[in-house]
Amino acid sequence: MKRNVPAGVENHPAFRGFNTGCCGRLVGHMAWVTVFVSDPESHWNAASEMRYKESEEKAIRFLMDSGGTAAGLHIKERAHYRVSLPFQEKRSEYKHTVSEAVLKMGYLSFEDMRASLRQTFFGVEHVAVFFVFNKKDRSFASVSNGHKSILSTRRSYVATDEFGVIYAGSRVYLPFVICHELLHLYGAMDYYYPDTVKREAEKHFLHSIMLDFGGVIHVDEFTKFLVGWNDDLTPDAIDFLKKTIVTRRSVSLDSITIHKPLKRRTVLEIAGKGDQHVDH
């Protein structure tokens, strides 16, 4: 349900992932699950896992201090798992990689994994899952609008296939990368692309974690609304929506690229519409 959204912007694509899927609102009791995935190209050991956990701790502190605590978010459980794959992971084949990792962990599917974790962690209302690789690439979140995966390649996936993929080979800004992708799982949108959206975001949400990692990084008020921390849109958010509603119709949620434009052409299927847009 879209709460307190004024007429004229209620169909903005930013609301496609609003309050839907398994990770609908970032409030209540949550389990944070990390899967360390090794492959022939990259491996995890005790030292690298510890470094990642430190970044994860910083991400959680930032999240809670930025509004999570006030909104009633409780990270009730945290768990870390390890899995090794016999083949080299490729970002372009992420669905296959995640499916194989899940099977290695003893689950039939990602949906089976999520359901099992919810039973394991008593009292948890939702589970955020990250598959983490000790290499460099562009992190992303596979998220849902309740019907299809917003980040899609050849086909659509069910609403339960919601997870983050983190490439931790570069530790620069890693806590913010983790937090950025978590917010995507709960409906946050990117502000850094395309240029028309970025220009408006720089006017209204400068230094938002969904825009860039420069300056004093914060979670802006519109992102708080999208993830369920606020009930009302601010005047800045309404103005931003009005000025970007046409542009954002052809752009879907994706992942962060730190201070760089997207380099390769990626076809994104717009959730629920069947439209396609080529991202440069």
Image (spheres, rainbow, N blue to C red):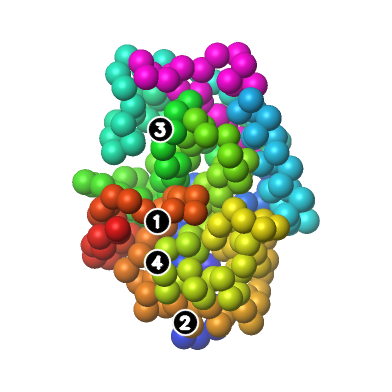
Quarter holding the C terminus?
Answer: bottom left
Q: Nearer the viewer, mark 2 or mark 4?
A: 4
Q: Tag on residue 150?
A: none
Q: Mark 3 to mark 2: distance in Å? A: 38 Å
Which label sits in the foreground, 1 or 4?
1
The type of residue carrying mark 3 is Phe
Does 135 appear above or below 68? above
* Image height of 161 relative to 200, above or below: above
- Distance CA(mark 1)–CA(mark 2): 22 Å
Q: Which residue is mark 2?
A: 243
Q: Position of residue 158 (x, y in %)?
A: 34, 45
Q: Give how far apart the Cα atoms at labels 1 and 3 are.
A: 31 Å
Q: Earlier in the sequence, mark 1 or mark 4?
A: 4
Q: CA distance from mark 3 to mark 4?
A: 32 Å
* Residue at mark 2 to residue at mark 4: CA–CA distance: 13 Å
Bin the neighbour count of mark 4 within 10 Å (Cα to Cα): few under 14, some 14-19, many 20 and up. some
The residue nearer to you, when weighing 169 against 277, is 169
- Which labelled disc corresponds to residue 261? 1
Residue 232 at x, y percent in the picture: 65, 74
* Nearest to the observer: residue 202 or residue 273: 202
Q: Identity of the amino acid at label 4?
A: Pro
Q: Is residue 2 above or below residue 33?
A: below
Q: Amino acid at mark 1?
A: Pro
Give yes or no for contact between labels 2 and 4 (Cβ–Cβ under 8 Å).
no
> Mark 3 sits on what residue?
110
What secondary structure is found at the residue carrying circle 4?
loop
N-term mark: 1 or 2: 2
The residue pinned by badge 4 equals 194
Nearer to us: label 3 or label 4: 4
Of pointers 1 and 3, the one earlier in the residue sequence: 3
